[in-house]
Image (spheres, rainbow, N blue to C red):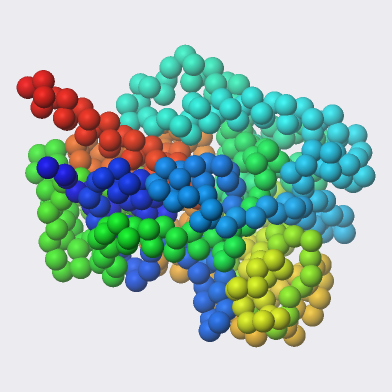
């Protein structure tokens, strides 16, 4: 008899789990507390305008496409286009630096802007090529439900080669001499909500991946991916319940037998938790003794704008660095205060995508890294927003205020209300003791039929990595089914 998998939470981890399992013939039900699916992968909308609310930068395209293909969605259905150049980085002193996937273009840029660092860049590529292959095989493609499988000689040797004992910034100092160039190759830890000086050096592979695999844009916005997946799930008859928050879970011995959601009781065979994991613990009061304290990733102050024009640029992605990036990071991760001189990222997809706004108009998104903390005073957010817009007008978007037709602000307070742990935008922080075996695993409790996927679960945050975690989970569930069938036949 075909058993059923109940997925609690319709974020990208839950959706991809459902996609792969339903392709393999499993019966799947999704229970989502919000009125929409996709979690942080959704749109901010205003009339005929729309822009991604959360993730914008598409990394690891081959991983993303191959996982979707395994779930039954062909590559031709995913309209991704490469960004060339990758992005511009603007420093406060007026200097700028452009990132390219093409090695020769990048070397030429380094030679012109930061002469003397060319050899370091070549060493960076050579070292990271080997480390990426090792890291992918040993950590991204394996789960550590059995923690002993992590502490093998091969894994420990790989960790040493990846220099997990170093942080990302310290590692980049081995390759580059100019502080601005070091910043250009460490800011990528913010893609997963990590401090460059607290994130293990293995996360420098994110920066390498930009050069090796490129940065891409999904036409229609990254959130278009959710629409494509949901359409396929509905075709297969996957049961999807929105506005259906799980209130309680009933366990007997080592199994969950039912859960209550949206006023109804659902008997369950297997459960996949896809909410932000630290918040899922509240559903399991019987296991309080195994709870641990987690450190959230950074939060984001997000400014969404509809414009009556499109700013012509080479690339849709830009970074604007502050006078003192280290000081900004200290305020975000250590002092837990709003930055007084923030670095920020801008995303202007209307340059290449006319589907997001009325004809001749555009959308613009600005992200400022800020603390994820319940103790931040958000009453001063308007001052920070005005400061950022001032900088945008001076450094890249002339007369911006004159062209804003509407604007909306989102803070970690909003993210926390929407179910993100302490308002962190990327799950738990990618610190050493929240990575690999130390991160919550896909079978996180001593319960036989409870599993987990999402940004706070190994292997970590970022859309393709969360999707990889969902694939690991689907493979794990399939193995358990095969073992159960073999056991019954043997019996």
Image quarter in which the N terminus is found: top left
The relative height of residue 348 versus residue 305 in the rendered view (above or below) is: above
> Is 424 or 213 nearer to us in this picture?
213
The relative height of residue 467 versus residue 487 in the rendered view (above or below) is: below
Q: Residue at x 76, y 52 (%)?
A: 85
Q: Is residue 317 left or right of residue 45?
A: right
> Is 358 or 126 nearer to us in this picture?
358
Q: Position of residue 207 (x, y in %)?
A: 67, 41
Q: Is residue 144 left or right of residue 479?
A: right
Does the image show residue 465? no
Q: Residue at x 34, y 71 (%)?
A: 35
The relative height of residue 63 versus residue 231 in the rendered view (above or below) is: above
Q: Position of residue 383 (x, y in %)?
A: 65, 75
Task: Using the rendered view, name the quadrant where residue 486 is placed.
Answer: top left
Task: Using the rendered view, name the quadrant where residue 300 is placed.
Answer: bottom right
Q: Is residue 244 left or right of residue 48?
A: left
Q: Position of residue 384 (x, y in %)?
A: 65, 71
- In the image as oriented, which residue stretches furthest toward the left? 491
Question: How many marks can you see?
Answer: 0
The relative height of residue 410 versus residue 331 in the rendered view (above or below) is: below
Q: Is residue 318 left or right of residue 195?
A: right
Q: Residue at x 50, y 69 (%)?
A: 43
Does the image show residue 264? yes
Q: Position of residue 51 (x, y in %)?
A: 57, 70
- In the image as oriented, which residue stretches furthest toward the top? 153
Image quarter in which the C terminus is found: top left
Q: Residue at x 17, y 45 (%)?
A: 3
């Amino acid at each position: 008899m075909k058993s059923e998998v109940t997925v609690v939470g319709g974020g990208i981890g839950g959706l991809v789990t459902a996609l792969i399992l339903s392709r393999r013939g499993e019966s799947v039900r999704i229970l989502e507390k919000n009125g929409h699916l996709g979690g942080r992968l959704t749109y901010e909308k205003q009339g005929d305008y729309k822009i991604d609310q959360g993730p914008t930068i598409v990394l690891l395209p081959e991983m993303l496409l191959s996982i979707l293909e395994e779930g039954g969605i062909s590559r031709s259905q995913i309209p991704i286009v490469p960004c060339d150049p990758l992005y511009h980085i603007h420093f406060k002193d007026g200097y700028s630096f452009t990132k390219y996937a093409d090695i020769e273009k990048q070397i030429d840029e380094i030679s012109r802007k930061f002469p003397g660092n060319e050899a370091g860049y070549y060493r960076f590529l050579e070292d990271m090529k080997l480390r990426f292959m090792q890291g992918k095989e040993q950590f991204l493609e394996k789960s550590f439900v059995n923690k002993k499988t992590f502490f093998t000689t091969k894994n420990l040797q790989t960790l040493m080669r990846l220099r997990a004992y170093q942080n990302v910034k310290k590692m980049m100092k081995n390759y580059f001499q100019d502080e601005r160039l070091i910043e250009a190759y460490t800011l990528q830890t913010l893609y997963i909500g990590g401090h460059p000086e607290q994130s293990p050096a293995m996360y420098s592979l994110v920066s390498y991946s930009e050069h090796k695999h490129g940065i891409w844009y999904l036409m229609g916005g990254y959130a278009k991916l959710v629409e494509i997946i949901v359409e396929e799930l509905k075709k297969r008859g996957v049961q999807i319940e929105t506005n259906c928050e799980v209130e309680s879970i009933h366990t007997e011995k080592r199994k969950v037998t039912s859960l209550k959601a949206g006023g109804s009781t659902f008997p369950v065979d297997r459960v996949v938790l896809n909410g932000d994991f630290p918040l899922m613990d509240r559903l399991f009061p019987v296991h309080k003794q195994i709870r641990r304290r987690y450190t959230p990733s950074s939060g984001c102050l997000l400014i969404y704008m509809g414009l009556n024009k499109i700013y012509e640029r080479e690339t849709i992605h830009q970074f604007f660095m502050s006078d003192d990036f280290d000081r900004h990071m200290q305020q975000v991760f250590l002092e837990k205060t709003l930055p007084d001189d923030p670095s920020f990222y801008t995303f202007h997809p209307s340059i290449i995508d006319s589907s997001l706004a009325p004809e001749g108009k555009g959308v613009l998104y600005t992200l400022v890294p800020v603390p994820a903390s319940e103790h931040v005073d958000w009453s001063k957010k308007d001052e920070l927003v005005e400061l950022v817009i001032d900088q945008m007008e001076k450094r890249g978007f002339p007369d911006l205020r004159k062209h804003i037709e509407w604007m909306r602000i989102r803070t970690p307070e909003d993210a926390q209300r929407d179910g993100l742990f302490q308002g962190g935008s990327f799950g738990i922080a990618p610190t050493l003791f929240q990575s690999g075996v130390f991160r919550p695993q896909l079978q996180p409790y001593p319960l036989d039929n409870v599993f987990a996927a999402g940004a706070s679960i190994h292997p970590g945050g970022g859309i393709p990595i969360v999707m990889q975690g969902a694939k690991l989970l689907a493979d794990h569930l399939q193995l358990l089914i095969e073992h159960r069938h073999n056991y019954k036949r043997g019996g």
